[in-house]
Image: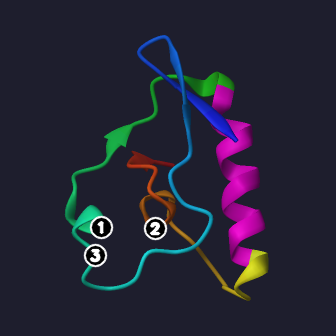
């Protein structure tokens, strides 16, 4: 899955949930600015949640620091 950041395509960094203590989880999330890729991000979140039998998942847990 790719996402756009400042006009360039970028791979989503993780295909697994980050664990407690990972410094990436302490980064401040930003509001969604580009709604074009929002559906792809949500689908990736659902895919990771299913893969790990998770009940819920936040975007920062897969390395996407956006408030969704």
Q: Quadrant of the N terminus?
A: top right
What label does residue 22 carry, if any?
A: 3
Residue visible at 49% across and 11% down in the picture: 7
Tell whether position 43 is magenta. yes
* Color scheme of the displayed model: rainbow
Asked if 29 appears above or below 57 in the picture, the reply is: above
Residues at badges 3 and 1 in contact (C-beta under 8 Å)?
yes
Helix, strand or loop at disc 1? Answer: helix
Residue 20: which quarter of the image? bottom left
Q: Which residue is mark 2?
A: 61
Question: Which dot, 3 or 2, sits closer to the camera?
Answer: 3
Question: Which dot, 3 or 1, sits closer to the camera?
Answer: 3
Count of residue discs: 3
Label 1: few (<14), some (14–19) or many (≥20) C-alpha neighbours in 10 Å: some
Residues at badges 1 and 2 in contact (C-beta under 8 Å)?
yes
Residue 5: which quarter of the image? top left
Helix, strand or loop at disc 3? Answer: loop
The CA distance from mark 3 to mark 1 is 6 Å
Residue 28 appears at what percent x and percent y? 22, 51
**Region in magenta:** 37-49
The CA distance from mark 3 to mark 2 is 9 Å
Residue visible at 66% across and 30% down in the picture: 37
Q: Which residue is mark 1?
A: 25
Look at the magenta stretch and give its main secondary structure: helix
In depth, the one of 21 and 32 nearer the eye is: 21
Helix, strand or loop at disc 2? Answer: helix
Label 3: few (<14), some (14–19) or many (≥20) C-alpha neighbours in 10 Å: few
């Amino acid at each position: 899955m790719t996402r756009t950041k400042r006009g360039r395509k970028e791979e989503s960094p993780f295909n697994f949930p980050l664990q407690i203590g990972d410094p990436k989880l302490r980064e401040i999330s930003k509001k969604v600015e580009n709604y074009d890729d929002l559906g792809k991000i949500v689908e990736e979140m659902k895919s990771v949640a299913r893969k790990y039998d998770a009940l819920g998942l936040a975007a920062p847990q897969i390395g996407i620091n956006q408030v969704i």
